[in-house]
Amino acid sequence: MILITALLLALPLPTPAQQPRQDAPAIQITFLDVGQGDAVLIRAPEGQTALIDAGQSDPTRLLHEMNVDQIDLLVASHPHADHIGGMTDVLNRIPVRFYMDNGQPHTTATYQRLLRTLQQHTDVTYLAAEPRTISLGSAELEVLPLPPPRADDHNNRSVGLVLRFGSFTAFLSGDSEIQELTRWVGQGVVPDVTLLKAPHHGSDNGFTPDFLETSRPEVVVISVGDNSYGHPRPEALYAYGAIADGVYRTDLHGSVTVFGYEDGSYEVLPGKDVSAPGRERGDADGPQASSDALWVFPDAPGNDHQNTNGEYAVLQSWSSQTIDLGGWTLCDVARHCFRFPAGAVLPDAGQLVVYTGYGTNDGVRFYMNSGRAVWNNSGDTATLYDAGGTAVLRYVY
Protein backbone atom coordinates (compact mmCIF):
# COMPACT_ATOMS: atom_id res chain seq x y z
CA MET A 1 0.00 0.00 0.00
CA ILE A 2 1.13 3.58 -0.68
CA LEU A 3 1.57 5.45 2.58
CA ILE A 4 0.17 8.95 2.18
CA THR A 5 -0.57 11.52 4.86
CA ALA A 6 -4.21 12.29 5.61
CA LEU A 7 -5.67 15.31 3.84
CA LEU A 8 -8.60 17.40 5.08
CA LEU A 9 -11.00 18.34 2.32
CA ALA A 10 -12.10 21.56 4.03
CA LEU A 11 -9.18 23.96 3.67
CA PRO A 12 -7.96 25.61 6.90
CA LEU A 13 -8.66 29.31 7.04
CA PRO A 14 -6.06 31.61 8.61
CA THR A 15 -7.14 34.03 11.30
CA PRO A 16 -7.86 37.37 9.60
CA ALA A 17 -6.27 40.61 10.69
CA GLN A 18 -8.81 42.89 12.36
CA GLN A 19 -7.25 46.08 10.97
CA PRO A 20 -4.12 47.02 9.03
CA ARG A 21 -0.91 48.12 10.68
CA GLN A 22 -0.59 51.82 11.32
CA ASP A 23 3.21 51.96 11.52
CA ALA A 24 4.01 51.42 7.83
CA PRO A 25 2.56 52.38 4.43
CA ALA A 26 0.63 49.61 2.68
CA ILE A 27 -0.64 48.76 -0.76
CA GLN A 28 -4.32 47.82 -0.49
CA ILE A 29 -5.84 45.19 -2.80
CA THR A 30 -9.57 44.54 -2.42
CA PHE A 31 -11.30 41.70 -4.24
CA LEU A 32 -14.84 43.02 -4.48
CA ASP A 33 -17.68 40.60 -3.84
CA VAL A 34 -19.40 40.99 -7.22
CA GLY A 35 -20.74 37.44 -7.51
CA GLN A 36 -19.47 35.28 -10.36
CA GLY A 37 -17.03 37.78 -11.80
CA ASP A 38 -13.89 39.79 -11.16
CA ALA A 39 -13.39 43.30 -9.80
CA VAL A 40 -10.14 44.10 -8.01
CA LEU A 41 -9.43 47.54 -6.55
CA ILE A 42 -5.81 48.52 -5.92
CA ARG A 43 -5.05 51.59 -3.82
CA ALA A 44 -1.49 52.87 -3.46
CA PRO A 45 -0.29 54.32 -0.13
CA GLU A 46 -0.40 57.77 -1.74
CA GLY A 47 -4.04 57.28 -2.80
CA GLN A 48 -3.77 56.42 -6.52
CA THR A 49 -6.20 53.71 -7.60
CA ALA A 50 -6.50 51.03 -10.26
CA LEU A 51 -9.57 48.90 -10.92
CA ILE A 52 -8.93 45.59 -12.64
CA ASP A 53 -12.21 44.41 -14.18
CA ALA A 54 -15.66 45.52 -13.03
CA GLY A 55 -17.82 42.44 -12.57
CA GLN A 56 -21.05 41.51 -14.31
CA SER A 57 -23.04 44.55 -13.14
CA ASP A 58 -22.59 48.01 -11.63
CA PRO A 59 -19.91 47.95 -8.85
CA THR A 60 -19.98 51.69 -8.17
CA ARG A 61 -21.93 51.36 -4.91
CA LEU A 62 -19.14 49.23 -3.48
CA LEU A 63 -16.54 51.66 -4.82
CA HIS A 64 -18.31 54.66 -3.33
CA GLU A 65 -18.50 52.86 0.03
CA MET A 66 -14.71 52.62 -0.18
CA ASN A 67 -14.47 56.38 -0.88
CA VAL A 68 -13.24 55.92 -4.44
CA ASP A 69 -13.76 59.26 -6.19
CA GLN A 70 -11.33 58.74 -9.09
CA ILE A 71 -9.80 55.76 -10.89
CA ASP A 72 -6.36 56.40 -12.28
CA LEU A 73 -6.22 53.15 -14.27
CA LEU A 74 -9.15 50.99 -15.38
CA VAL A 75 -8.20 47.61 -16.88
CA ALA A 76 -10.40 45.14 -18.72
CA SER A 77 -8.52 41.86 -18.53
CA HIS A 78 -10.58 40.45 -21.41
CA PRO A 79 -14.01 41.21 -22.93
CA HIS A 80 -16.24 38.66 -21.17
CA ALA A 81 -19.36 40.03 -19.48
CA ASP A 82 -18.42 38.89 -15.97
CA HIS A 83 -15.34 41.12 -16.22
CA ILE A 84 -16.58 44.14 -18.20
CA GLY A 85 -20.34 44.16 -17.49
CA GLY A 86 -20.01 46.94 -14.91
CA MET A 87 -17.45 49.08 -16.75
CA THR A 88 -19.95 51.29 -18.50
CA ASP A 89 -21.36 52.29 -15.10
CA VAL A 90 -17.85 52.91 -13.75
CA LEU A 91 -16.95 55.14 -16.69
CA ASN A 92 -20.22 57.09 -16.42
CA ARG A 93 -20.15 57.59 -12.65
CA ILE A 94 -16.51 57.84 -11.60
CA PRO A 95 -13.78 59.88 -13.34
CA VAL A 96 -11.25 57.60 -15.09
CA ARG A 97 -7.85 58.77 -16.31
CA PHE A 98 -6.50 55.77 -18.24
CA TYR A 99 -8.15 52.68 -19.72
CA MET A 100 -6.40 49.47 -20.83
CA ASP A 101 -7.60 46.30 -22.51
CA ASN A 102 -6.08 43.50 -24.60
CA GLY A 103 -7.14 45.07 -27.89
CA GLN A 104 -9.23 42.06 -28.88
CA PRO A 105 -12.82 42.95 -29.83
CA HIS A 106 -15.88 40.88 -29.06
CA THR A 107 -19.29 40.65 -30.73
CA THR A 108 -21.44 40.76 -27.58
CA ALA A 109 -23.85 43.59 -26.75
CA THR A 110 -21.95 44.10 -23.47
CA TYR A 111 -18.68 44.75 -25.28
CA GLN A 112 -20.32 46.96 -27.93
CA ARG A 113 -21.94 49.07 -25.19
CA LEU A 114 -18.58 49.48 -23.46
CA LEU A 115 -16.95 50.48 -26.75
CA ARG A 116 -19.58 53.18 -27.37
CA THR A 117 -19.13 54.50 -23.84
CA LEU A 118 -15.35 54.72 -24.27
CA GLN A 119 -15.81 56.63 -27.53
CA GLN A 120 -17.99 59.15 -25.67
CA HIS A 121 -15.41 59.68 -22.90
CA THR A 122 -12.75 61.54 -24.87
CA ASP A 123 -11.04 62.53 -21.61
CA VAL A 124 -10.02 58.90 -20.96
CA THR A 125 -6.59 57.97 -22.37
CA TYR A 126 -6.31 54.52 -23.93
CA LEU A 127 -3.30 52.32 -23.13
CA ALA A 128 -2.50 49.18 -25.09
CA ALA A 129 -1.72 46.11 -22.99
CA GLU A 130 1.85 45.76 -24.17
CA PRO A 131 4.87 45.00 -21.97
CA ARG A 132 5.40 48.10 -19.87
CA THR A 133 5.68 49.23 -16.25
CA ILE A 134 3.08 51.65 -14.90
CA SER A 135 3.68 53.65 -11.73
CA LEU A 136 0.85 53.73 -9.21
CA GLY A 137 2.21 56.00 -6.53
CA SER A 138 5.12 54.14 -4.92
CA ALA A 139 3.86 50.83 -6.38
CA GLU A 140 4.41 49.48 -9.88
CA LEU A 141 2.24 47.46 -12.24
CA GLU A 142 4.11 45.35 -14.79
CA VAL A 143 2.07 44.39 -17.85
CA LEU A 144 3.00 40.94 -19.16
CA PRO A 145 3.32 40.10 -22.88
CA LEU A 146 0.17 38.88 -24.61
CA PRO A 147 0.03 36.04 -27.15
CA PRO A 148 -1.22 36.68 -30.72
CA PRO A 149 -5.01 37.16 -30.97
CA ARG A 150 -7.31 34.16 -31.35
CA ALA A 151 -10.93 34.98 -32.06
CA ASP A 152 -12.19 31.85 -30.30
CA ASP A 153 -10.10 32.18 -27.12
CA HIS A 154 -10.49 35.33 -25.04
CA ASN A 155 -9.47 33.75 -21.72
CA ASN A 156 -5.96 32.96 -22.91
CA ARG A 157 -5.41 36.59 -23.89
CA SER A 158 -6.26 37.94 -20.46
CA VAL A 159 -4.13 40.90 -19.46
CA GLY A 160 -1.53 39.70 -16.96
CA LEU A 161 -0.35 42.12 -14.26
CA VAL A 162 2.37 41.84 -11.63
CA LEU A 163 1.92 44.37 -8.81
CA ARG A 164 5.06 45.24 -6.84
CA PHE A 165 5.36 47.27 -3.66
CA GLY A 166 8.80 46.76 -2.22
CA SER A 167 9.12 43.02 -1.52
CA PHE A 168 5.34 42.50 -1.68
CA THR A 169 4.21 41.07 -5.04
CA ALA A 170 0.78 40.18 -6.40
CA PHE A 171 -0.20 38.39 -9.63
CA LEU A 172 -3.51 39.10 -11.39
CA SER A 173 -4.47 37.65 -14.77
CA GLY A 174 -8.22 37.56 -15.30
CA ASP A 175 -9.33 34.21 -16.72
CA SER A 176 -5.95 32.93 -17.89
CA GLU A 177 -5.95 29.21 -18.55
CA ILE A 178 -3.25 26.58 -18.99
CA GLN A 179 -2.02 27.88 -22.35
CA GLU A 180 -1.33 31.44 -21.22
CA LEU A 181 0.02 30.47 -17.80
CA THR A 182 2.40 27.96 -19.40
CA ARG A 183 3.57 30.58 -21.90
CA TRP A 184 4.38 33.06 -19.12
CA VAL A 185 6.25 30.43 -17.11
CA GLY A 186 8.28 29.57 -20.23
CA GLN A 187 9.06 33.26 -20.80
CA GLY A 188 10.34 33.59 -17.25
CA VAL A 189 7.99 36.47 -16.37
CA VAL A 190 6.19 34.75 -13.46
CA PRO A 191 7.84 35.84 -10.19
CA ASP A 192 7.63 34.41 -6.69
CA VAL A 193 4.49 36.15 -5.41
CA THR A 194 2.94 36.98 -2.09
CA LEU A 195 -0.64 37.15 -3.39
CA LEU A 196 -2.35 35.36 -6.28
CA LYS A 197 -5.76 36.10 -7.70
CA ALA A 198 -6.81 32.62 -8.73
CA PRO A 199 -7.09 32.64 -12.54
CA HIS A 200 -10.52 31.83 -14.00
CA HIS A 201 -12.47 31.82 -10.73
CA GLY A 202 -10.79 28.70 -9.35
CA SER A 203 -11.37 26.60 -12.46
CA ASP A 204 -9.50 23.32 -12.95
CA ASN A 205 -7.91 24.86 -16.08
CA GLY A 206 -6.78 27.99 -14.24
CA PHE A 207 -3.58 26.58 -12.81
CA THR A 208 -0.70 24.26 -13.63
CA PRO A 209 1.78 22.62 -11.24
CA ASP A 210 4.65 24.52 -12.91
CA PHE A 211 2.84 27.84 -12.54
CA LEU A 212 2.14 27.27 -8.84
CA GLU A 213 5.65 25.95 -8.20
CA THR A 214 7.09 29.05 -9.89
CA SER A 215 4.79 31.63 -8.27
CA ARG A 216 4.52 29.93 -4.85
CA PRO A 217 1.80 32.28 -3.53
CA GLU A 218 1.39 32.73 0.20
CA VAL A 219 -2.23 33.86 -0.16
CA VAL A 220 -4.75 32.95 -2.87
CA VAL A 221 -8.03 34.81 -3.34
CA ILE A 222 -10.75 33.32 -5.55
CA SER A 223 -13.30 35.74 -7.01
CA VAL A 224 -16.39 33.57 -7.39
CA GLY A 225 -20.16 33.49 -6.89
CA ASP A 226 -23.07 31.17 -7.55
CA ASN A 227 -22.44 29.46 -10.88
CA SER A 228 -23.20 26.35 -12.92
CA TYR A 229 -19.54 25.59 -13.67
CA GLY A 230 -18.66 24.10 -10.31
CA HIS A 231 -16.21 26.94 -9.54
CA PRO A 232 -14.11 26.77 -7.54
CA ARG A 233 -13.22 23.23 -8.54
CA PRO A 234 -12.10 20.88 -5.77
CA GLU A 235 -8.84 20.08 -7.54
CA ALA A 236 -8.03 23.80 -7.65
CA LEU A 237 -8.81 24.14 -3.95
CA TYR A 238 -6.52 21.19 -3.22
CA ALA A 239 -3.73 22.64 -5.33
CA TYR A 240 -3.95 26.11 -3.79
CA GLY A 241 -4.30 24.73 -0.26
CA ALA A 242 -1.20 22.59 -0.75
CA ILE A 243 1.04 25.55 -1.54
CA ALA A 244 -0.50 28.67 0.07
CA ASP A 245 -0.88 29.61 3.73
CA GLY A 246 -4.38 30.96 3.16
CA VAL A 247 -7.12 30.51 0.55
CA TYR A 248 -10.04 32.97 0.52
CA ARG A 249 -13.22 33.03 -1.56
CA THR A 250 -15.48 36.00 -2.14
CA ASP A 251 -18.57 33.77 -2.09
CA LEU A 252 -17.69 32.71 1.48
CA HIS A 253 -15.71 35.67 2.83
CA GLY A 254 -17.29 38.61 1.03
CA SER A 255 -14.98 41.34 -0.26
CA VAL A 256 -11.44 40.37 0.74
CA THR A 257 -8.80 43.05 1.35
CA VAL A 258 -5.08 42.30 1.47
CA PHE A 259 -2.69 44.92 2.90
CA GLY A 260 0.83 44.46 1.56
CA TYR A 261 3.90 46.04 3.13
CA GLU A 262 7.26 46.91 1.62
CA ASP A 263 9.06 44.28 3.70
CA GLY A 264 6.92 41.57 2.06
CA SER A 265 4.60 41.02 5.01
CA TYR A 266 0.84 41.24 4.63
CA GLU A 267 -2.46 41.18 6.45
CA VAL A 268 -5.81 39.86 5.21
CA LEU A 269 -9.18 41.34 6.13
CA PRO A 270 -12.21 39.36 4.89
CA GLY A 271 -15.53 41.13 4.65
CA LYS A 272 -17.22 38.26 6.46
CA ASP A 273 -15.98 36.35 9.49
CA VAL A 274 -16.13 32.65 8.67
CA SER A 275 -15.01 31.21 11.99
CA ALA A 276 -16.82 27.93 11.38
CA PRO A 277 -16.99 27.47 7.61
CA GLY A 278 -19.55 25.16 6.12
CA ARG A 279 -18.82 22.47 3.58
CA GLU A 280 -16.94 23.65 0.55
CA ARG A 281 -18.68 23.50 -2.82
CA GLY A 282 -18.45 19.91 -4.02
CA ASP A 283 -18.03 18.41 -0.53
CA ALA A 284 -21.36 16.61 -0.65
CA ASP A 285 -19.77 13.76 -2.56
CA GLY A 286 -16.35 13.84 -0.92
CA PRO A 287 -14.98 12.96 2.50
CA GLN A 288 -14.49 15.46 5.30
CA ALA A 289 -11.22 13.77 6.16
CA SER A 290 -9.59 10.61 4.91
CA SER A 291 -6.43 8.60 5.35
CA ASP A 292 -6.72 7.62 1.70
CA ALA A 293 -5.45 9.68 -1.20
CA LEU A 294 -8.22 8.86 -3.65
CA TRP A 295 -11.52 10.68 -3.91
CA VAL A 296 -14.40 10.65 -6.36
CA PHE A 297 -16.70 13.55 -7.19
CA PRO A 298 -19.53 11.73 -9.00
CA ASP A 299 -22.34 14.26 -9.25
CA ALA A 300 -21.65 16.51 -12.23
CA PRO A 301 -23.54 19.81 -12.59
CA GLY A 302 -26.63 19.19 -14.71
CA ASN A 303 -27.14 15.88 -16.52
CA ASP A 304 -24.23 13.58 -15.66
CA HIS A 305 -24.28 11.86 -19.07
CA GLN A 306 -24.19 15.21 -20.88
CA ASN A 307 -21.42 16.60 -18.66
CA THR A 308 -19.07 13.66 -18.32
CA ASN A 309 -16.10 15.84 -17.39
CA GLY A 310 -18.17 17.22 -14.52
CA GLU A 311 -17.41 14.00 -12.65
CA TYR A 312 -13.86 12.95 -11.84
CA ALA A 313 -11.52 11.19 -9.43
CA VAL A 314 -8.66 12.91 -7.60
CA LEU A 315 -5.43 11.14 -6.68
CA GLN A 316 -3.31 13.04 -4.14
CA SER A 317 0.14 12.27 -2.76
CA TRP A 318 1.90 13.81 0.21
CA SER A 319 4.80 11.36 0.12
CA SER A 320 8.39 12.34 -0.64
CA GLN A 321 8.72 10.05 -3.65
CA THR A 322 7.46 10.08 -7.21
CA ILE A 323 5.22 7.12 -8.09
CA ASP A 324 5.33 5.59 -11.57
CA LEU A 325 1.69 5.00 -12.60
CA GLY A 326 2.34 3.57 -16.07
CA GLY A 327 0.08 0.54 -16.57
CA TRP A 328 -1.91 1.16 -13.37
CA THR A 329 -5.71 1.17 -13.61
CA LEU A 330 -8.52 3.03 -11.87
CA CYS A 331 -11.86 1.19 -11.87
CA ASP A 332 -15.37 1.55 -10.51
CA VAL A 333 -17.28 -1.41 -9.03
CA ALA A 334 -18.74 -2.23 -12.48
CA ARG A 335 -15.19 -2.49 -13.89
CA HIS A 336 -15.25 0.64 -16.01
CA CYS A 337 -11.50 1.20 -15.96
CA PHE A 338 -8.94 3.79 -16.98
CA ARG A 339 -5.38 2.63 -17.65
CA PHE A 340 -2.64 5.18 -17.01
CA PRO A 341 -0.35 5.48 -20.05
CA ALA A 342 3.36 4.76 -19.95
CA GLY A 343 5.25 7.65 -18.41
CA ALA A 344 2.38 8.78 -16.16
CA VAL A 345 3.64 9.67 -12.69
CA LEU A 346 2.23 10.97 -9.43
CA PRO A 347 4.92 13.41 -8.25
CA ASP A 348 5.89 13.79 -4.62
CA ALA A 349 3.33 15.96 -2.83
CA GLY A 350 1.47 16.11 -6.14
CA GLN A 351 -2.00 15.59 -7.48
CA LEU A 352 -3.70 14.43 -10.65
CA VAL A 353 -7.30 14.24 -11.82
CA VAL A 354 -9.01 11.56 -13.93
CA TYR A 355 -12.06 12.93 -15.77
CA THR A 356 -14.71 10.62 -17.15
CA GLY A 357 -15.20 12.39 -20.49
CA TYR A 358 -13.04 13.24 -23.48
CA GLY A 359 -9.81 15.21 -23.49
CA THR A 360 -6.06 15.07 -24.00
CA ASN A 361 -3.90 13.79 -21.18
CA ASP A 362 -1.34 16.37 -20.06
CA GLY A 363 0.32 14.59 -17.14
CA VAL A 364 -1.91 16.25 -14.56
CA ARG A 365 -5.33 15.81 -16.14
CA PHE A 366 -6.26 12.40 -17.57
CA TYR A 367 -9.42 11.38 -19.43
CA MET A 368 -11.31 8.08 -19.53
CA ASN A 369 -12.80 9.10 -22.91
CA SER A 370 -16.20 7.76 -21.94
CA GLY A 371 -19.34 9.09 -23.59
CA ARG A 372 -21.42 8.32 -20.50
CA ALA A 373 -21.09 8.93 -16.78
CA VAL A 374 -19.23 6.20 -14.88
CA TRP A 375 -19.40 6.99 -11.17
CA ASN A 376 -22.76 6.30 -9.49
CA ASN A 377 -24.12 9.26 -7.57
CA SER A 378 -25.83 6.99 -5.02
CA GLY A 379 -22.62 5.17 -4.10
CA ASP A 380 -19.73 3.35 -5.71
CA THR A 381 -16.21 2.05 -5.09
CA ALA A 382 -13.10 3.42 -6.76
CA THR A 383 -10.08 1.10 -6.75
CA LEU A 384 -6.56 1.86 -7.95
CA TYR A 385 -4.62 -1.21 -9.13
CA ASP A 386 -0.90 -1.31 -9.79
CA ALA A 387 0.56 -2.71 -13.02
CA GLY A 388 0.47 -6.22 -11.58
CA GLY A 389 -3.24 -6.01 -10.73
CA THR A 390 -2.83 -5.57 -6.97
CA ALA A 391 -5.30 -3.20 -5.30
CA VAL A 392 -3.33 -0.26 -3.93
CA LEU A 393 -5.96 2.29 -2.92
CA ARG A 394 -9.71 2.06 -2.51
CA TYR A 395 -12.32 4.74 -1.90
CA VAL A 396 -15.90 3.75 -0.98
CA TYR A 397 -18.68 6.32 -0.87
Image (cartoon, rainbow, N blue to C red):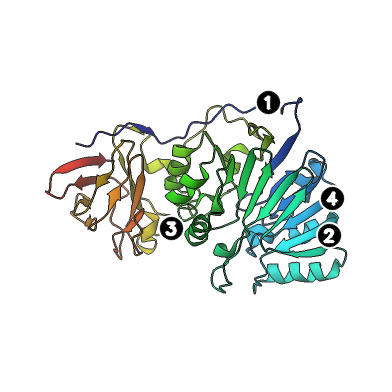
Q: CA distance from mark 4 to mark 2?
A: 12 Å
Left or right: residue 16 compared with residue 385: right
Q: CA distance from mark 1 to mark 2?
A: 34 Å
Local secondary structure at mark 4: loop
Disc 2 residue type (three-letter): Asn
Local secondary structure at mark 2: helix
Residue 92, numbered circle = 2
Reading the image, the residue beneath label 4 is: 70
Residue 253 occupies quadrant: top right
Local secondary structure at mark 1: loop
CA neighbours of label 2 inside 10 A, class few (<14), some (14 to 19), many (20+): some
From what the image shows, is residue 258 above or below residue 201?
A: above
Reading the image, the residue beneath label 1 is: 18
Left or right: residue 145 compared with residue 323: right
Report whether residue 290 is seen: yes
Who's the residue at 53% across and 28% down the image?
276
Q: Residue 257 versus residue 209: which sits nearer the camera?
A: 209
Residue 306 occupies quadrant: bottom left
- Find residue 64 and report its horizontal and vertical position in percent: 81, 45
The earlier-in-sequence mark between 3 and 1 is 1
From what the image shows, is residue 91 above or below residue 48?
A: below
Disc 3 residue type (three-letter): Gly
Q: Kindly report which numbered mark, 1 or 2, lies closer to the viewer in this rendering.
A: 1
Who's the residue at 65% across and 74% down the image?
107
Residue 302, numbered circle = 3
Q: Are marks 3 and 4 in contact (CB under 8 Å)?
A: no
